[in-house]
Amino acid sequence: MKKDITDSVISNLKEKARSLRIEVLRMLTDAGSGHTGGSLSAADIVTALYFYKMKHNPENPQWRERDRFILSKGHAAPILYAALAISGYFDRALLKTLRKLGSPLQGHPCSKMLAGIEISTGSLGQGLSISNGIALGLKLDGLTSRVYCLLGDGEIQEGQVWEAAMTSSHYKLDNLCAIIDNNGLQIDGHCCDVMHIEPIVNKWRAFGWHVIDIDGHDMKAIIEALNQADNVKKKPTMIVARTVKGKGVSIFEGKVQYHGIAPTQEELEIAIKELGS
Protein backbone atom coordinates (compact mmCIF):
# COMPACT_ATOMS: atom_id res chain seq x y z
CA MET A 1 0.00 0.00 0.00
CA LYS A 2 2.89 2.38 0.77
CA LYS A 3 3.81 4.76 -2.09
CA ASP A 4 6.33 7.54 -2.66
CA ILE A 5 5.14 10.86 -1.22
CA THR A 6 4.45 12.73 -4.46
CA ASP A 7 2.11 15.69 -4.93
CA SER A 8 -0.25 13.32 -6.71
CA VAL A 9 -0.31 10.91 -3.76
CA ILE A 10 -1.00 13.75 -1.33
CA SER A 11 -3.75 15.14 -3.57
CA ASN A 12 -5.42 11.74 -3.87
CA LEU A 13 -5.29 11.21 -0.10
CA LYS A 14 -6.83 14.63 0.56
CA GLU A 15 -9.65 13.79 -1.85
CA LYS A 16 -10.12 10.45 -0.09
CA ALA A 17 -10.32 12.20 3.29
CA ARG A 18 -12.95 14.55 1.89
CA SER A 19 -14.98 11.54 0.72
CA LEU A 20 -14.70 9.90 4.12
CA ARG A 21 -15.93 13.06 5.84
CA ILE A 22 -18.99 13.16 3.58
CA GLU A 23 -19.75 9.49 4.29
CA VAL A 24 -19.43 10.14 8.02
CA LEU A 25 -21.84 13.06 7.94
CA ARG A 26 -24.40 11.21 5.84
CA MET A 27 -24.42 8.13 8.04
CA LEU A 28 -24.62 10.16 11.25
CA THR A 29 -27.52 12.19 9.91
CA ASP A 30 -29.34 9.02 8.86
CA ALA A 31 -28.72 7.53 12.31
CA GLY A 32 -29.79 10.67 14.15
CA SER A 33 -27.12 10.09 16.77
CA GLY A 34 -23.40 9.51 17.08
CA HIS A 35 -20.11 11.33 17.32
CA THR A 36 -19.47 14.01 14.73
CA GLY A 37 -16.55 16.06 16.05
CA GLY A 38 -14.10 13.25 16.87
CA SER A 39 -14.85 11.40 13.63
CA LEU A 40 -14.04 14.46 11.53
CA SER A 41 -10.90 15.34 13.52
CA ALA A 42 -9.51 11.83 12.89
CA ALA A 43 -10.40 11.70 9.18
CA ASP A 44 -6.97 12.62 7.80
CA ILE A 45 -5.16 10.21 10.12
CA VAL A 46 -7.45 7.30 9.29
CA THR A 47 -7.17 8.10 5.58
CA ALA A 48 -3.37 8.03 5.71
CA LEU A 49 -3.43 4.69 7.50
CA TYR A 50 -5.94 2.85 5.32
CA PHE A 51 -5.09 4.34 1.93
CA TYR A 52 -1.34 4.87 2.19
CA LYS A 53 0.34 3.10 5.05
CA MET A 54 -1.22 -0.10 6.28
CA LYS A 55 -0.88 -3.55 4.79
CA HIS A 56 -4.41 -4.94 4.70
CA ASN A 57 -6.64 -6.96 2.40
CA PRO A 58 -10.40 -6.34 2.29
CA GLU A 59 -10.87 -9.66 0.47
CA ASN A 60 -9.11 -11.49 3.30
CA PRO A 61 -9.61 -9.48 6.52
CA GLN A 62 -7.84 -12.14 8.60
CA TRP A 63 -4.74 -12.18 6.37
CA ARG A 64 -1.98 -13.17 8.79
CA GLU A 65 0.58 -10.66 7.50
CA ARG A 66 -1.75 -7.65 7.82
CA ASP A 67 -1.06 -4.60 9.94
CA ARG A 68 -3.52 -4.15 12.79
CA PHE A 69 -5.53 -1.01 13.57
CA ILE A 70 -7.08 -0.48 16.99
CA LEU A 71 -9.56 2.39 17.36
CA SER A 72 -9.15 3.01 21.07
CA LYS A 73 -11.43 6.06 20.85
CA GLY A 74 -14.23 3.75 19.77
CA HIS A 75 -16.89 6.45 19.75
CA ALA A 76 -15.32 7.69 16.49
CA ALA A 77 -16.50 4.48 14.80
CA PRO A 78 -18.12 6.31 11.83
CA ILE A 79 -14.76 7.34 10.39
CA LEU A 80 -13.51 3.75 10.66
CA TYR A 81 -16.68 2.41 9.03
CA ALA A 82 -16.30 4.90 6.18
CA ALA A 83 -12.68 3.82 5.62
CA LEU A 84 -13.60 0.13 5.67
CA ALA A 85 -16.49 0.62 3.26
CA ILE A 86 -14.48 2.62 0.74
CA SER A 87 -11.62 0.11 1.06
CA GLY A 88 -14.06 -2.65 0.04
CA TYR A 89 -14.66 -4.57 3.27
CA PHE A 90 -18.43 -4.25 2.80
CA ASP A 91 -21.02 -2.58 0.58
CA ARG A 92 -21.24 1.17 1.14
CA ALA A 93 -25.05 0.85 1.34
CA LEU A 94 -24.51 -0.72 4.76
CA LEU A 95 -23.38 2.66 6.08
CA LYS A 96 -27.03 3.71 6.14
CA THR A 97 -27.66 1.16 8.90
CA LEU A 98 -25.37 2.85 11.45
CA ARG A 99 -26.76 2.42 14.98
CA LYS A 100 -29.86 0.60 13.70
CA LEU A 101 -31.06 -2.49 15.57
CA GLY A 102 -29.32 -5.61 14.24
CA SER A 103 -26.82 -3.66 12.18
CA PRO A 104 -23.15 -4.72 12.32
CA LEU A 105 -22.34 -1.00 12.45
CA GLN A 106 -22.84 -0.41 16.14
CA GLY A 107 -22.21 2.87 17.92
CA HIS A 108 -18.82 1.48 18.85
CA PRO A 109 -16.83 -1.05 16.79
CA CYS A 110 -17.83 -4.70 17.32
CA SER A 111 -15.35 -7.30 16.07
CA LYS A 112 -17.90 -10.11 16.20
CA MET A 113 -20.27 -8.34 13.81
CA LEU A 114 -18.12 -6.66 11.16
CA ALA A 115 -15.15 -7.80 9.07
CA GLY A 116 -12.13 -5.55 9.39
CA ILE A 117 -12.66 -4.70 13.06
CA GLU A 118 -9.74 -6.19 15.01
CA ILE A 119 -11.27 -5.79 18.46
CA SER A 120 -14.37 -4.28 20.04
CA THR A 121 -13.56 -0.92 21.60
CA GLY A 122 -15.34 1.94 23.25
CA SER A 123 -14.53 1.72 26.93
CA LEU A 124 -11.88 4.42 26.90
CA GLY A 125 -8.32 3.72 27.97
CA GLN A 126 -8.14 0.08 26.93
CA GLY A 127 -6.96 0.23 23.33
CA LEU A 128 -3.29 0.75 24.06
CA SER A 129 -3.20 -2.24 26.42
CA ILE A 130 -4.82 -4.37 23.73
CA SER A 131 -2.33 -3.05 21.17
CA ASN A 132 0.55 -4.04 23.45
CA GLY A 133 -0.71 -7.59 23.60
CA ILE A 134 -1.12 -7.80 19.83
CA ALA A 135 2.32 -6.27 19.22
CA LEU A 136 3.95 -8.75 21.61
CA GLY A 137 2.13 -11.61 19.93
CA LEU A 138 3.29 -10.56 16.48
CA LYS A 139 6.89 -10.50 17.67
CA LEU A 140 6.54 -13.95 19.27
CA ASP A 141 5.16 -15.25 15.97
CA GLY A 142 8.06 -13.73 14.05
CA LEU A 143 5.81 -11.47 11.97
CA THR A 144 6.86 -8.04 10.73
CA SER A 145 3.31 -6.65 10.80
CA ARG A 146 2.80 -3.40 12.69
CA VAL A 147 0.13 -2.24 15.13
CA TYR A 148 -1.47 1.21 14.90
CA CYS A 149 -3.55 2.50 17.81
CA LEU A 150 -5.60 5.72 17.66
CA LEU A 151 -6.34 7.37 21.01
CA GLY A 152 -8.31 10.47 21.94
CA ASP A 153 -6.68 13.23 23.95
CA GLY A 154 -9.40 13.13 26.62
CA GLU A 155 -8.89 9.39 26.73
CA ILE A 156 -5.33 9.67 27.99
CA GLN A 157 -6.74 10.97 31.26
CA GLU A 158 -7.39 7.30 32.01
CA GLY A 159 -4.84 5.69 34.34
CA GLN A 160 -4.71 2.47 32.33
CA VAL A 161 -3.22 4.38 29.40
CA TRP A 162 -0.12 5.18 31.44
CA GLU A 163 0.24 1.62 32.70
CA ALA A 164 0.09 0.57 29.06
CA ALA A 165 2.61 3.26 28.11
CA MET A 166 5.11 1.80 30.56
CA THR A 167 4.47 -1.69 29.23
CA SER A 168 5.04 -0.65 25.61
CA SER A 169 8.48 0.79 26.34
CA HIS A 170 9.43 -1.93 28.84
CA TYR A 171 8.97 -4.57 26.14
CA LYS A 172 10.59 -2.35 23.48
CA LEU A 173 7.59 -2.62 21.16
CA ASP A 174 9.04 -0.96 18.08
CA ASN A 175 6.30 -2.56 15.98
CA LEU A 176 3.76 -0.35 17.77
CA CYS A 177 2.82 3.16 16.59
CA ALA A 178 0.17 5.03 18.56
CA ILE A 179 -1.45 8.28 17.48
CA ILE A 180 -3.23 10.81 19.69
CA ASP A 181 -6.07 12.73 18.04
CA ASN A 182 -5.20 15.87 20.01
CA ASN A 183 -8.21 18.11 19.27
CA GLY A 184 -8.33 19.67 22.74
CA LEU A 185 -12.02 18.96 23.43
CA GLN A 186 -13.92 16.19 25.16
CA ILE A 187 -17.57 15.61 25.99
CA ASP A 188 -17.56 17.89 29.04
CA GLY A 189 -15.51 20.74 27.59
CA HIS A 190 -11.89 21.63 27.00
CA CYS A 191 -9.45 18.92 28.07
CA CYS A 192 -7.39 21.54 29.90
CA ASP A 193 -10.40 22.36 32.10
CA VAL A 194 -11.57 18.78 32.75
CA MET A 195 -8.13 17.29 33.48
CA HIS A 196 -5.05 19.00 32.09
CA ILE A 197 -3.03 16.61 29.93
CA GLU A 198 -0.11 18.81 28.89
CA PRO A 199 2.79 18.59 28.32
CA ILE A 200 1.82 15.54 26.23
CA VAL A 201 5.05 15.31 24.24
CA ASN A 202 7.29 15.42 27.31
CA LYS A 203 5.14 12.91 29.18
CA TRP A 204 5.36 10.29 26.46
CA ARG A 205 9.10 10.86 26.08
CA ALA A 206 9.48 10.39 29.84
CA PHE A 207 7.69 7.06 29.50
CA GLY A 208 10.29 5.86 27.00
CA TRP A 209 8.54 6.55 23.71
CA HIS A 210 9.85 8.08 20.50
CA VAL A 211 7.51 11.06 20.02
CA ILE A 212 6.66 12.95 16.82
CA ASP A 213 4.62 16.17 17.11
CA ILE A 214 2.70 17.10 13.95
CA ASP A 215 -0.24 18.98 12.47
CA GLY A 216 -2.80 16.18 12.26
CA HIS A 217 -4.44 17.67 9.17
CA ASP A 218 -1.22 18.03 7.16
CA MET A 219 -1.36 14.88 5.05
CA LYS A 220 2.31 14.98 4.10
CA ALA A 221 3.32 15.42 7.75
CA ILE A 222 1.12 12.48 8.77
CA ILE A 223 2.60 10.04 6.29
CA GLU A 224 6.16 11.25 6.94
CA ALA A 225 5.60 10.61 10.65
CA LEU A 226 4.19 7.15 9.96
CA ASN A 227 7.19 6.35 7.77
CA GLN A 228 9.62 7.70 10.38
CA ALA A 229 8.08 5.36 12.95
CA ASP A 230 9.08 2.36 10.78
CA ASN A 231 12.75 3.12 11.43
CA VAL A 232 12.58 3.54 15.21
CA LYS A 233 14.20 0.61 16.97
CA LYS A 234 13.67 -0.82 20.46
CA LYS A 235 11.00 1.66 21.51
CA PRO A 236 7.38 2.41 20.53
CA THR A 237 6.41 5.56 18.64
CA MET A 238 3.77 8.09 19.63
CA ILE A 239 2.53 10.58 17.03
CA VAL A 240 0.90 13.57 18.73
CA ALA A 241 -1.41 14.85 16.01
CA ARG A 242 -2.70 18.35 16.68
CA THR A 243 -6.20 18.40 15.20
CA VAL A 244 -9.44 20.41 15.19
CA LYS A 245 -12.66 18.88 16.47
CA GLY A 246 -15.15 18.78 13.60
CA LYS A 247 -12.42 19.55 11.05
CA GLY A 248 -13.62 20.28 7.53
CA VAL A 249 -17.00 21.87 8.29
CA SER A 250 -17.00 25.36 9.77
CA ILE A 251 -20.27 24.98 11.69
CA PHE A 252 -18.78 22.03 13.61
CA GLU A 253 -15.13 23.06 13.98
CA GLY A 254 -13.91 23.60 17.54
CA LYS A 255 -17.40 23.25 19.05
CA VAL A 256 -17.68 20.93 22.01
CA GLN A 257 -21.44 20.43 21.57
CA TYR A 258 -20.74 18.38 18.43
CA HIS A 259 -18.75 15.81 20.37
CA GLY A 260 -21.70 13.46 20.63
CA ILE A 261 -24.58 14.67 18.48
CA ALA A 262 -25.38 14.07 14.82
CA PRO A 263 -25.96 16.76 12.20
CA THR A 264 -29.52 17.76 11.38
CA GLN A 265 -30.64 17.47 7.76
CA GLU A 266 -30.17 21.22 7.38
CA GLU A 267 -26.66 21.04 8.84
CA LEU A 268 -25.84 18.13 6.56
CA GLU A 269 -26.78 20.13 3.49
CA ILE A 270 -24.59 23.03 4.64
CA ALA A 271 -21.70 20.66 5.35
CA ILE A 272 -21.95 18.83 2.02
CA LYS A 273 -21.99 22.14 0.17
CA GLU A 274 -18.93 23.30 2.10
CA LEU A 275 -17.05 20.07 1.49
CA GLY A 276 -17.74 20.41 -2.20
CA SER A 277 -19.84 17.43 -3.13
Image (tube, helix red, strand yellow):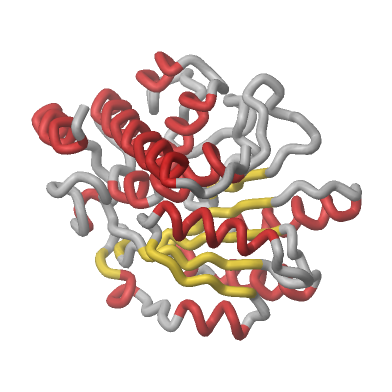
Q: Quadrant of residue 241?
A: bottom left
In the depicted structure, whether residue 48 falls above or below residue 209: above
Near-viewer residue (253 or 185) = 253
In the depicted structure, whether residue 233 falls above or below residue 264: below
Does residue 206 appear in the picture of this structure? yes
Residue 85 on image: x %, y %: 48, 24
Q: Is residue 14 left or right of residue 140?
A: left
In the depicted structure, whether residue 37 falls above or below residue 192: above
- The residue sitting at 34% across, 62% down in the picture is 183
Q: Quadrant of residue 129?
A: bottom right
- The residue sitting at 21% across, 27% down in the picture is 277
- The residue sitting at 53% across, 82% down in the picture is 203
Q: Is residue 216 left or right of residue 266?
A: right
In the depicted structure, whether residue 95 falls above or below residue 215: above
**Could you tell me which quadrant the N terminus lies in?**
top right
- The residue sitting at 66% across, 20% down in the picture is 59
Near-viewer residue (220 or 74) = 220
Q: Is residue 25 left or right of residue 9?
A: left
Does residue 125 appear in the picture of this structure? no
Residue 71 on image: x %, y %: 54, 47
Near-viewer residue (26 or 272) = 272
Residue 251 on image: x %, y %: 13, 47
